[in-house]
Image (tube, rainbow, N blue to C red):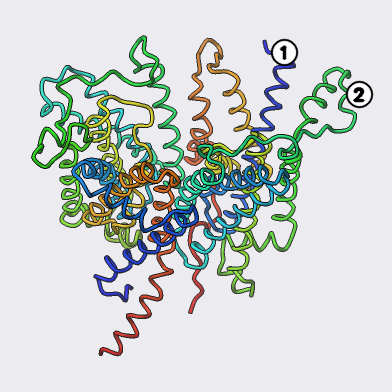
Amino acid sequence: MMDLVTILQILDSTLRLATPLLFACLAGLFSERAGIIDIGLEGKMLVAAFFAASTAALTGSVWLGMLAGMAASVVLALIHGLASITFRGDQLISGVAINFLASGITVLIGENWFSLGGRTPSLEGAARFQPVNLPFAETLRDVPLLGPIYADLISGHTILVYVGLLTVVATWYILFRTRFGLRLRAVGENPGAVDTAGVSVVRLRYSAVIICGLLCGLAGAYLATGLAAGFVKEMSAGRGFIALAALIFSKWRPWYALSACLLFGLLEAIGNRYQKLEILGVVIPGQFMQALPYILTVVILAGFVGKATPPRAGGSPYVKER
Amino acid sequence: MSRLPKWADVALIPLINLLLALIFSGLVVLYIGESPFEAMTIMVRGAVGSAYGWGYTLYYATNFIFTGLCVAVAFHARMFNIGGEGQAAIGGLGVALVALSVDWPHWALALPAAVIGGAVFGAAWAAIPGYLQARRGSHIVITTIMFNFIASALLVYLLVNVLKVPGSMAPETARFPEGARLPSAYDIAPWLGFRKSAPLNIAFLLAVLCCVLVWLLIWRTRLGYEIRAYGHSEPAAVYAGIPPFKIIMVAMLVSGGLAGLMGINAVMGEAERLVIDNVQGAGFVGIAVALMGRSHPFGVFIAAILFGALYQGGAELEFEMPAVSREMILVIQALVILFTGALDNMIRMPVERLFLKFGKRGA
C-alpha cells in the first residue's frame, strides 16, 4: 500500500502540474464564454514561457519575466482578435496559425539571443519563483496527519500556484456576479441581443480575448520560471490542448474547471512517478495515462457522461445588420 | 456573393496573401541579422535548383498532397478535419502491418495491398470523430485534435511494447522485406539526374492519381455534388433529401483514407520501417496547403509543391545560414495560414472594393 508520504508527494506534484492547466483553462473559459473559440492556448503559453524565461535570464527578475511573458501572450491574443473579431476570419484556423507561429518564433529568436539550441540559460535565485512557506508550516508539522498535509501539501508552493487558485474564485465572481460578466456570457450566447441593448460586441469580445492572453501569459510564465528553470523548445508539450480538454470536461464552468485541471494534473503526476501502473493485476501502460485526458474528453463530448453544451455563438463572427 | 472575377479569387488574392506572408517572414530574417533576399535565393536554389533538391522537394510535396487533399475533402462538406496528423500516423501503421505481414515477392503486389492497409487504417481513425459528429453532435475539430494525441500515444505504446524488434533498443519495426520496397526516383528515372539518396519515390505518382480521383469525385459524381451541396447549406441539402449522416461519414472516411495514404510515401517509400513520429507535422501542413489551394485538387497540388520547396529550401537555409534555424519554416507556414486563412478578409474586402470601383468605371 502507499504510505502517507507518497500520497502527499503525488498530490503535491498534482497541484504544481495542475496550475499551468488551470491558468490556460480559465483563459479559454473567458474567451469561449464570449464566443471566441481559442485553440491557440498552446501557442500563447509557449511564447509566454519563452519571453518570461528569457527576460528573467537577462534582467535577473522573475517579475519582469512574468510581465514580458504576459505581454507576448497578449500580442498573440490580439492577432487572434484581429482575425476573428475585426476581419471575421475563421477562429479555428487563426488558432492553428498562432500555435505554429509560437513554435517557430520561440526557437528562432531563442537561438538568436542565446545560441543554446533554442533553450534559455538556466534560471536561479531571483530569476525564478521561489517556494512560499505559509506561516507556522514548520511548527505544525508534528501534528498528526493534518501537520504534514499543511506543511508539505498546502505550504511550500510558488506564489503563482496560490494565484491560480484565487483566479478560479475571481473568474467565478467576474462571470457570474458582475455586469461585465453577464454581458460577456451574453455575447457568447446571443451577440445580437447584446448589440440591441446598445453594448459593443466588439469591445466585449476584445476584452475577453485580452483577458485570455493575460491568463495564458501566467500559465507560460509559471511553466518556465516556476515549474522548470528556464525555457526548452516546445516545453508546453500539449498542455494547451489538455487545458482545452479540461475546459470541455468542465462544461465551461470555473469550479468544474478547477476539478478537471486537478484530475488531469493527478494523471500527469501519477504518470511521471510510475512508468507502469498495476491495478488489480492489470498492467496499465504509461502511454494510456498520457492519453486518458483526451479519451475522457471524447467520451464527455460524445455525451455518454452528461452533455457538454458550448456557448451557442462560439466560433461564428458577429455581423451587424446593415 | 463573390463580387470578384474568378481569376482574382483563385489567383490574385492567394498571391497577395502569400506575398504578405513572405514579407513578414523577411522581416523576421532581417531581425535576426541576415539578408532576406539572400535567404530567399538560398531557399529557391536549394529546393528547385538541382535534381538533388527536386528529389527532396517532390518527396515532401507528396506527403503534403495527401494531407492537403485530406483537409480539402472535409472542407467541401464544411468540416475542419484537423486530425490529418493522427490519421496519417495510424495510416502509416496500416501500411507497416501490411508490408511486414507477408514476405512480398514483388513491390507491384505489395503496393496495392499497402494502399488498402493505409487507407483503411486512416479512414477508421477518422470514422470515430465523424460518427460522433454525425450522431452525437461532438465538435469534429475538438475530437480530431484529441484523436491526434491518442494516436501518438497508441503508436508509442505499440512500437515500444509490441512491434519493436526483440533485443533492439530503438522503438521501430523491423525493416520491410525486399519485395515491399518501392522503386525510388533513381530506379525509375536516373537519366533525370536523381541520386540514390533521393527519397522521392513512386508514391508521387499515386498522389497525382489521388488528385485526379478527388477532382472526379467532387465535381463529376452525384456523391461529390451532395458533399458540396451539404457544405454550402445543410438545411438546403436536407430539404433536397441528402442525408447529413451519410455525407459526414463519407467525407470523413475519404478524408482520413487520403491522410492514411501518406504512409505509402513516408513509411513504405522512404523509411522502409515504422518509426515514432512518422508524420512529422505533415498533417498540419495539409491545412495550409488546402487553404492556399482553395480546396481544389489542382490548387492543392501546386500548394503542396510550394510547401515541399519551402521544407527542402528551409533545410538548405539552415545549412548555409546557421543563424536562421529550421524553425523558420514553421514561421513561414504560420504566416501563410494566418494570411490566407484567418486574415483573408483583410485583403479581400479592399480588393473587392477596388474591383467594384473599376468595374463601374468600365461599364
At a point 20% along the width and 33% down the height, the residue shown is: B115
Callouts 1 and 2 close, C-beta under 8 Å = no
**SS under mark 2:** helix
* Residue at mark 1: chain: A
Residue farthest to the left, as pictured: B191
- Asked if residue B171 lies left or right of residue A61, the reply is left
Q: Amino acid at mark 2?
A: Thr
At a point 44% along the width and 51% down the height, the residue shown is: B331
In the rendered image, residue A211, in percent from the top left (x then y), is placed at 65, 56
Quarter-of-image position of residue A263: top right
- Asked if residue A190 lies left or right of residue B30, the reply is right
Camera-nearest residue between B302 and B111 = B302
**What is the number of the mark on residue B2?**
none
**Taking B277 as reference, is B5 above or below it?**
below
* Residue at mark 2: chain: A
Tell me the residue that label 2 is attached to: A139
**Taking B9 as reference, is A107 above or below it?**
above
At a point 53% along the width and 25% down the height, the residue shown is: A289
In the rendered image, residue A217, in percent from the top left (x then y), is placed at 63, 49
Q: Amino acid at mark 1?
A: Asp
Residue A63, visible in the rendered structure: yes
**What is the number of the mark on residue A3?**
1
At a point 64% along the width and 75% down the height, the residue shown is: A198
**Taking B37 as reference, is B144 above or below it?**
above
Can you say which quadrant of the picture contains the N terminus of chain A? top right
Query: How many C-alpha atoms fall within 10 Å of the one at disc 2: few (<14), some, or many (≥20)?
Result: few
